[in-house]
Amino acid sequence: MTENNIRLTYHCDVELLTPVHIGSGDRYVEHFDFSYNTQARRLTVFDRNKLLEQVAGSGETGIQAFTRAIEEETLEDWLGRKPDGIDIDAARIHNFACEKKPRDILVQLRTGTSDALLAGSSLKGAFRTAVLAKLSHEENRRSVEGLKQELMRQQRVNQKTADSRISKNLLGPDAQKNLMRCLSVGDCTFPADTIKPQTVIIYRMVTPKKMDKKHFDIVLEKISEGNKGDCQISFDTYLGTKGKDYLGGRTALTLDWILDAARRKTQKTIATELDFFNGVSGNYTQMLKTFYEHLEDKIRDIKENEVILQLAWGSGWNGMTGELLEKRDLTQDLRKKLSLADKYPSFPFPKSRRFALINGQAIPMGWVKLSFTDKEEKKRLEAEQRATAINNAKKQKTLDDAKREREKQWNAMDETEQDIAVVQQTDLALEQAPQKGPLKDVWPKLENAEPDIRKKLAQVFIGQWERTPDLWRKKECSNSQWEKVERVVEISGIDHPDIQRLDADDQQLVDKIHSLSDFGQYSNSDVDINQLSLAASECLNSKFIAWGCNNKNAKENKRQAFKNLQNALKKLRKS
């Protein structure tokens, strides 16, 4: 705790006991933000900005293909074809198993740097509900009883403003004189990788004594259970004590008062849920009952400076002002006035619950533990943070110095040395020239380089390929790769187990066939199919195929020449 003239400030540690969802108000949309593979039953969510950035860089053809996929709702098929310029892994946020395709996905609130945000307003909202409940208890529920009578007299009831009378009576008539002005709660952030997808089951009553899940689930982003963060909470001591008359003579908000209110609220929620689940059956009923029994045990062991409470999405009716109404208050007439499942008068209200299903266990959403530290503890934490910041600064300086040294080392290399490093995929090349690739940027230089440089580059490619069979051996690598292998072997002059060395005359004939550009040049040459070696025949065979001599629609002379060559090849391969 720190203290100044008008505020008391506490450090608050936040531990997520169950998943928490703070909605941003946005939703991921199918065929744009996410795709669903029906066969694999997997759902992939993309970073909209990263995906669009990649599409924009893929050229006009790529943009048109992407636009067509969006319009035709075939994004999954388009991505499955691995279009050029699209790195699915880089654009992917989530990829997870999902039994049914959701209509949309609720987006978790984030900071500008994509960290998960548990907004201070969400924590303050949970405190507000607890404060209202305690104030109502202290005045013997006079405001609640007055509200019930007023609602029954009204012809039409606006559900959104029905509780305004209670709020004004207990907290203050307007924003300026509202008791909650005394309380300020800071935001709590969690690392971006704590945001995970979660399927939430809607579990509702189907008979007065039985519950079952709805046919559809809700998919959302959660801040994962077990994570920890921190924030600050402060109290305006001037408004809370000296300004008490200005606030209408109501209580002064202090940390102890707030903690007591929150504990009362939690105890009532647990008691309400246990009472509810004791009266109904269903597949998940016992799991949920067990959860609240364990939670009841847990709150008995918390320290004086700690509190467990439920907040945000998933807390439902009991997490809002509606919690002020007791079970006995919800008569059939009042439920009809407020449209509270009035078509099911034999069902208790609320008649449904939402929970996450994690490793086969039903887990209610939004339960957190808050721990408030005193002044000395806060000083210790700040000292640790300062030491960590100094240590991180030293480490960063070391990293920056090392980076500058590597940049200097890279810039001192000539073009050929850099090309060799790119082919060898050295750490230096990957850091300084991540955009360069061996085949994309270095291979095209092979033909135009000076002979000594060409030989150096060929030897480097050989060194990278010869340890990998599917890049080096003829039977295991692709046709295009094998052509590259033949070329580097030719340039370097080394022996290759799959390449026959030709004598001078045979090599001259192969070179001659290589130089032929079309079937007409072949027809006018003195190349005799029946006099060719195996190497020369195979070279000519590649040419014939390139010229379409093996096509059914080829001219008769082409087809006959191709047939004659095949017969010759059979004899040569047998000999």
Image (cartoon, rainbow, N blue to C red):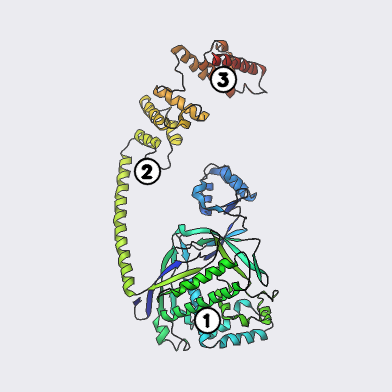
| x and y percentages locating residue 564 in the rendered image | 61, 14
* Amino acid bearing label 1: Ala
Q: CA distance from mark 3 to mark 2?
A: 44 Å
| x and y percentages locating residue 219 in the rendered image | 58, 60
Q: Decide: is 35 above or below 25.
A: above
First in residue order: circle 2 vs circle 1: 1
Mark 3 against mark 2, which lies toward the viewer? Answer: 3
Residue 432's disc number: 2
Mark 1 against mark 3, which lies toward the viewer? Answer: 1
Q: Quick one: label 3, few (<14), some, or many (20+) residues within 10 Å?
A: some
* Amino acid bearing label 2: Gln
Q: CA distance from mark 1 to mark 3?
A: 89 Å
Secondary structure under the numbered disc 3 in the rendered image: helix
Residue 541's disc number: 3
Q: CA distance from mark 2 to mark 1?
A: 61 Å
Q: Nearer the viewer, residue 379 or 306?
A: 306
